[in-house]
């Protein structure tokens, strides 16, 4: 049976959001930041009512879709330095989501503290590291190709 690499990439992207959420939740426990990644992403829809469940759904969809795009880029451009490229892509994705959130911040939701931006940037790095490691293990493993 042929493996569906795009499906595997999507699952990897979706699952890679979980360690990022765990890390941002830990940082919130220590008083760093205001929202976890899931809560912040839920604000795209709820505007001013952060909810983890809706944020989980948004993150799974965004993480899975972006991982498929990243996999296709790796197939086309090469898969050297997977972890570094995945981290860079995760940070770029974080910046894109921050731009979307800037449209409602200050109008519908309170201005977030600067530490919140660092929290989410760190979460994006964790997302990229996890995604790169899983890509290397399950999609670009030289022994399985």
Image: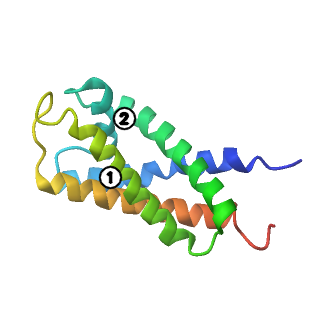
Estimate the x, y position of residue 67 in percent, counting from the top left. Answer: 56, 50
Estimate the x, y position of residue 45 in percent, counting from the top left. Answer: 32, 26
Circle 2 Cα neighbour tier, 10 Å, few/some/many (<14 / 14–19 / ≥20) = many
Estimate the x, y position of residue 35 in percent, counting from the top left. Answer: 22, 43
- Position of 143 relative to 105 (above/below): below
Residue visible at 43% across and 40% down? 59
* Circles 1 and 2 in contact, beta carbons < 8 Å: no
On the image, which quarter does residue 143 sit in? bottom right
Q: Is residue 31 visible?
A: no
Whether residue 88 sits left or right of residue 37 in the image: it is right
Circle 1 Cα neighbour tier, 10 Å, few/some/many (<14 / 14–19 / ≥20) = some
Residue identified by numbered label 1: 95
Residue visible at 10% across and 50% down? 113
Marks 1, 2: nearer the viewer: 1
Along the line of sight, which residue is nearer the eye, 89 or 64?
A: 89
Whether residue 129 sits left or right of residue 67 in the image: it is left
Element carrying mark 1? helix
Residue visible at 40% across and 51% down? 93
Element carrying mark 2? helix
Nearer-N-terminus badge (1/2)? 2
On the image, which quarter does residue 46 sit in? top left
Q: Which mark is residue 62?
A: none
Whether residue 140 sits left or right of residue 124 in the image: it is right
Along the line of sight, which residue is nearer the eye, 100 or 84?
A: 100
CA separation in Å, label 1 and label 2: 17 Å
Question: In the displayed image of the protein, which residue is found farthest to the front?
Answer: 77
Residue identified by numbered label 2: 55
Colour pattern = rainbow
Question: In the displayed image of the protein, which residue is found farthest to the right?
Answer: 1
């Amino acid at each position: 049976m042929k493996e569906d690499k795009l499906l595997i990439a999507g699952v990897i992207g979706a699952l890679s959001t979980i360690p990022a959420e765990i890390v941002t939740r830990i940082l919130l426990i220590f008083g760093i930041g205001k929202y976890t990644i899931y809560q912040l992403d839920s604000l795209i829809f709820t505007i001013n009512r952060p909810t983890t469940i809706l944020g989980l759904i948004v993150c799974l969809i965004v993480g899975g879709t972006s991982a498929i795009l990243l996999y296709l880029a790796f197939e086309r451009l090469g898969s050297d330095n997977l972890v570094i490229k995945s981290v860079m892509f995760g940070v770029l994705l974080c910046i894109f989501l921050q731009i979307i959130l800037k449209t409602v911040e200050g109008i519908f939701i309170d201005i977030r503290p600067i530490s919140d931006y660092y929290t989410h940037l760190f979460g994006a790095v964790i997302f990229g590291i996890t995604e790169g490691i899983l890509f290397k293990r399950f999609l670009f493993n030289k022994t399985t190709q």
